[in-house]
Each structure stands twice: as structure tokens, then as C-alpha cells.
């Protein structure tokens, strides 16, 4: 799907009916010379050691070699004050757009970006989205889609749903759930827990209760005590609302067959434990297909292409597909593809969504380029 536009452009050129301007633009060498004036984009991060962020960083590093775009990253953001300070410092450094991989103040961050003349993209939903969608500097967000076909709930709910449904559908009889910040009122974790429970129910699992919840964070006494109780009990699966690495050693040392599921990455660690049969499911937001779309959204807005920056005067909501990986072969292929220096949305693929390189780009182009399914990824990685 993502190559359709590029192939059409190539076909038109071969037939000799493309305009001179289009021919020149599609001959771009991906050598970092476009756009002519460098565009700086700020990236706000909640934890600079987070594996997903590091994977996004690698992809953006690659894009910097192909386009004249400079990404400027925050330190780990710990407070609202830190967030606003980073936005202000990024603006002073010449950034014209911000990708919020994390957002403490929600609408206040968008307002501060607007005050600084910076365009904003980042995950939003519910009241937050409603409060900023009319702001001319709110360029937009993604709409995470999954195999559940649910377009009503947000990405966090869907992540929980996918894990709950997948692990219950595998036939596990006693499932524990690490709820992360749900007990502390953190909305993203509340949404993930609600989705997880709904996924269990959809798969016909009726054995879940409050006693199956592991609360808090790794490193705390309460978490260690709850983890020990799970390992020593009759649980045969653990689902985590964040990563699951802290369960690897206890599960291996227990000698029990306990299946693990988590929001995870297609990296060497998860691949190894998938291949060993310990990890049974991860919900994976592929860096280039999910977070790559923010780059042309910002660039088109910054360069003034209104028709690819707004949707009837409102910020964009672009559908992208997350991948629920349940087979070792799937993660093996993804890892090998990335490890060889490949991307499921390459710089050449992305070019179709830049209005300055493809004058025919529309809002639908974003979806054509970035909405890559897991099945399509498996074909690409062959």
C-alpha cells in the first residue's frame, strides 16, 4: 500500500507525461539537501533510556541523513515546568515544530507551542483532543487501529484489549495483570486496564479478579511482594501494561511455564524470549509506521501547505496500524529487516507525503504511506 503513490509517479514519468517540475522533484537524491532551508523539530521525551524512544531516535537519525531536517531532543521530562521550559528553549533554538512523545500539561503545551509559533503533533484523545483540535498550531495526532476493528477507543485502551484478547485466546487459565500507574490515577494506564479486561471478556475468559492485579512499579517492595506471589502461585500467564523485562529472570528461575505479554519492542531481547517461548505476545508500535507520520505532518504545516496540514480547519487525525505480534517468526522477520538497515517506511516512501516533493500529496497520502499492516510488513520483510 505504502508504495502505491511512488510507483504511480514512476510510471507516469516513464510514460513521459509528468511535468518538468514533478520530474525534477521526484529525482531528489535523498542526500539531505531538501528542504532548501533546514527545518528543526523538537522532540519531547519522558525517559531518554526508554526502548521505544531509542528506536524512534534511530529512525529519525536515518531521516536526518536523507532530508534537511534536524531533530532536537529534550532531556527526560519530569514536570510541567520542565515541559514548558523545553518548548521555550526549542523555540529559541529555531524549532518550528514539536513532536510530543510525552505530554505533562496536555492542552497547555499546545498553547505554549502556539505562543512560540511552533506546530505541535502528539498522541491526544478525548477531552484533550477536543480542546486543541481547532488550534491552528495543533497539526494533529494519529488514530491507532488494531485487529479489533475498534475506532471508538484510544490507543492505550486498544493496546490493553489486544493483549487481553490474544493471551486469553491462547487458552491460559490464570492470568495476572501489571497495571502500572492505574492505581495512581494515570489515565493511560487506566485505559489500558479497561481495554485488557474487555479483551479477556471478548475471548471468553471469566476468571479475572482484583486479586490478580500487580500494582505499582518495579523496584518497590509492594511490586516485589506481588511478583513473588504470582511466581509462587498457580498463574500461567502475566500481562504487563508496560514492558515485561522485569519478569524474565523470575520466570526463568522458577522453572514454570508462564507466558508473558506486554507493550514491547521488536528488539533483540524480546526476540530472544519469543524464540525461547517465554514471551507470547507484544503490542508493538512500529517506529516508522506509527511515529514516522508526524514528520511530514509537521514539515507540510511548517512549509505552509494548508491542504495537507489541516482538515476543514481542524488538526489532523491520521489512521495508523499497530501490530500485535503473537508468533516468533513475525518478530524474527521484523528484527532482521531492521537490523539490516531497512525501514518499513523508507525515506523514499515518505517522499510521497511531502507536498514539496509530491504536489499531488493529499491527506489520504498519509494513510497510503504509513498505514502498513503486520501482514504487509511480513511480505515486505521477505
Image: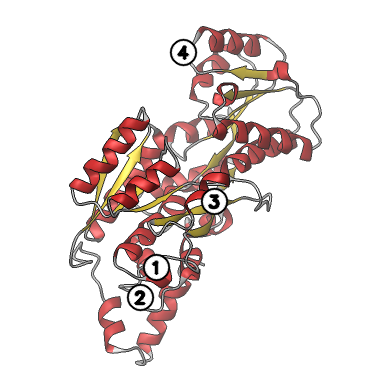
The location of residue 145, given as percent across then percent down, is 59, 52
Cα gap from disc 1 to disc 3, whole angstroms: 26 Å
**Disc 1, disc 2: CB below 8 Å?**
yes
Residue at image point 59% right, 18% down: 215
For label 1, count other residues whose C-alpha is less than 10 Å away and answer few (under 14), some (14-19) or many (20+): many
> In the image, residue 60 lies at what x, y percent?
31, 50
User: Could you tell which of marks 1 and 3 lies nearer the N-terminus?
Assistant: 3
| SS for callout 1 | helix
Q: CA distance from mark 4 to mark 1?
A: 44 Å
Estimate how packed mark 4 is, as few (under 14), some (14 to 19) or many (20 or more) residues with alpha carbons within 10 Å: few
Residue at 66% across, 39% down: 161
Q: Nearer the viewer, mark 3 or mark 2?
A: 3
Q: Position of residue 210 (x, y in %)?
A: 72, 19
Circle 3 residue:
130
The answer to whether residue 246 is above or below residue 96 is: above
Q: Residues within 10 Å of mark 2 (few under 14, many from 20)?
A: some
Nearest-to-viewer mark from 4 and 3:
3
Badge 1 or badge 2: first in the primary sequence: 1
Question: Which residue lies at the image location 51% right of the left edge and 18% below the top edge?
Answer: 217
Q: In the figure, residue 226 lies in which quadrant?
A: top right
In the rendered view, would you say 353 is above or below 268?
A: below
According to the picture, the residue beneath numbered tag 4 turns out to be: 219
Q: Which residue is mark 1?
A: 353
99 displayed left or right of 289: left
Name above or below for residue 90 compared with residue 347.
Answer: above
Foreground residue among 358 and 4: 358
Task: Return the mark for residue 358.
Answer: 2
Pick the front one: 367 or 300: 300
Q: Earlier in the sequence, mark 4 or mark 2?
A: 4
Q: Nearer the viewer, mark 1 or mark 3?
A: 3
Amino acid at each position: 500500500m505504502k508504495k502505491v503513490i511512488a510507483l504511480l509517479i514512476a510510471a507516469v514519468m516513464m510514460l513521459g507525461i509528468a511535468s518538468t517540475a514533478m520530474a525534477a522533484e521526484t529525482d531528489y537524491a535523498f542526500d539531505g539537501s531538501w528542504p532548501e532551508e533546514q527545518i528543526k523539530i523538537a522532540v519531547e521525551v519522558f525517559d531518554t533510556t526508554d526502548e521505544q524512544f531509542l528506536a524512534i531516535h534511530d529512525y529519525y537519525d536515518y531521516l536526518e541523513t536523507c532530508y534537511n531536517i534536524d531533530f532536537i531532543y529534550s532531556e527526560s521530562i519530569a514536570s510541567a515546568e520542565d515541559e514548558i521550559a523545553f518548548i521555550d528553549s526549542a523555540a529559541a533554538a529555531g524549532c518550528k515544530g514539536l513532536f510530543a512523545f510525552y505530554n505533562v500539561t496536555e492542552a497547555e503545551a499546545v498553547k505554549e507551542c502556539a505562543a512560540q509559533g511552533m506546530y505541535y503533533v502528539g498522541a491526544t484523545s478525548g477531552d484533550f483532543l477536543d480542546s486543541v483540535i481547532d488550534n491552528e498550531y495543533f497539526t494533529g495526532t494519529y488514530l491507532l487501529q488494531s485487529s479489533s476493528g475498534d475506532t471508538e477507543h484510544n490507543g492505550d485502551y486498544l493496546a490493553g484489549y489486544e493483549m487481553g484478547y490474544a493471551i486469553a485466546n491462547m487458552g491460559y487459565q490464570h492470568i495476572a495483570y501489571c497495571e502500572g500507574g492505574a492505581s495512581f490515577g494515570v489515565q493511560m494506564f487506566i485505559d489500558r486496564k479497561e481495554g485488557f479486561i474487555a479483551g479477556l471478556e471478548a475471548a471468553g475468559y471469566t476468571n479475572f479478579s482484583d486479586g490478580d492485579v500487580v500494582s505499582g512499579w518495579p523496584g518497590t517492595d509492594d511490586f516485589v511482594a506481588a511478583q513473588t506471589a504470582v511466581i509462587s502461585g498457580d498463574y500461567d500467564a502475566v500481562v504487563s501494561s508496560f514492558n515485561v523485562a522485569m519478569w524474565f529472570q523470575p520466570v526463568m528461575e522458577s522453572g514454570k511455564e508462564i507466558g508473558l505479554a506486554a507493550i514491547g519492542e521488536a528488539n533483540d531481547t524480546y526476540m530472544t524470549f519469543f524464540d525461547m517461548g517465554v514471551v507470547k505476545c507484544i503490542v508493538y508500535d512500529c517506529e516508522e509506521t506509527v511515529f514516522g507520520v508526524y514528520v511530514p505532518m509537521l514539515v507540510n504545516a511548517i512549509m505552509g501547505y494548508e491542504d495537507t496540514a489541516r482538515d476543514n480547519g481542524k488538526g489532523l487525525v491520521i489512521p495508523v496500524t499497530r501490530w500485535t505480534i503473537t508468533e516468533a517468526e513475525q518478530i524474527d522477520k521484523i528484527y532482521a529487516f531492521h537490523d539490516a538497515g531497512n525501514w518499513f517506511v523508507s525515506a523514499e516512501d515518505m517522499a510521497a507525503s511531502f507536498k514539496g516533493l509530491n504536489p499531488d500529496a493529499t491527506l489520504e497520502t498519509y494513510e497510503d504511506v504509513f498505514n502498513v499492516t503486520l501482514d504487509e510488513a511480513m511480505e515486505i520483510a521477505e
